[in-house]
Image (cartoon, rainbow, N blue to C red):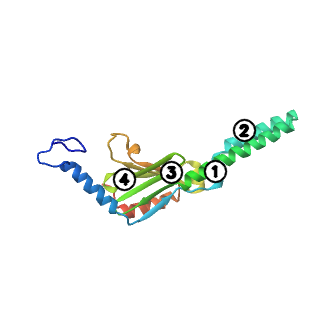
Amino acid sequence: MKCRICGAKLKKDGDICKSCYKAYLEEEELKKDVNEQLRIKRKYSIAYEIAKYIWIFVIFILSSIICISTGGFLEELLIILIFAVTIGFLLFIDKRIAMATQVIFYEKKMVYTFKFLFFDTEKIVKYSDLKDITYYQTFRQKKFGFGDLCVYAKGIFPGATLLNGFQIKNVENVKEVLGAIGQVIGSLD
């Protein structure tokens, strides 16, 4: 007989090997872990998002100057409309992404969720599988008090720890959040 999950040859009658049964028990134990310790969400700030799209403002101003110098009122009106629609659309997308991105820390695991349009991602990382948790900040993020939180996990892709983990952008007060994560998960071994 063979294991119905991995195909390994079984010595005794049954339909699952010891290794797959152990993985099944671990998975069932993780499902029971529902005691939420910490929740981190992506922060949305309209001022930060507008600063992120400063290049669109520059293009708009240059286009406006050209239209004013050529005397095209309709062209100027069209540029203003295109600019308003573009900025509105980008801000809408950023807000939806921020609302749909979070990570919840439990006693033995963390669950990262991201839902947007046709993308529905959920990653479960056991604390025992963590390789590192770190953050980085761009110059603009420092000015607004944000940072990107990166969770690196051990996994099946050697050398590709971010593929096994996840990143949550624009976390408010990222240094303090990293300290709170350390209190929840303890030290990384």
Q: x%, y% of residue 124?
A: 38, 53
The residue at which mark 4 appears reads as: 125
Along the line of sight, the residue nearer the viewer: 88 or 159 = 88
Q: How far separated are the C-alphas under marks 4 and 1? A: 30 Å
Identity, as a three-letter code, of the amino acid under mark 3: Lys
Find the distance from the CA under tag 1 to the CA under tag 2: 20 Å
User: Could you tell which of marks 3 and 4 lies nearer the N-terminus?
Assistant: 3
Q: Which of marks 2 and 3 is nearer the N terminus?
A: 2
Q: Residue 92 carries which label?
A: 1
**Three-letter amino acid code of the residue under disc 2:** Ile
Residue 115 got which mark? 3
Please state the horizontal and vertical placement of residue 35, each as a whole percent of the image: 38, 66
Classify 153 as above or below 157.
Answer: below
Q: Mark 2 points at which residue?
A: 59
Does dot 4 land on a helix, a strand or a loop?
A: strand
Mark 4 or 1 closer to N-term? Answer: 1
- Relative horizontal placement of residue 108, taking residue 89 as reference (left or right): left
Label 2 vs label 4: CA separation? 43 Å
Query: Where residue 161 sits in the image (x, y, percent)?
Result: 38, 44
Could you give the CA–CA distance between mark 2 and mark 3, rounded to whole angstroms? 32 Å
- Assign the C terminus to one quadrant of the image: bottom left
| Closer to the camera in the image, 61 or 165 | 165
Classify 10 Å Cα crowding around label 1: few (below 14), some (14-19), many (20 and above): few
**Mark 2 against mark 4, which lies toward the viewer?**
4
Q: Quadrant of the N terminus?
A: top left
Determine which quarter of the picture holds residue 77. Answer: top right
In this view, which residue lies farthest toward the left? Answer: 11
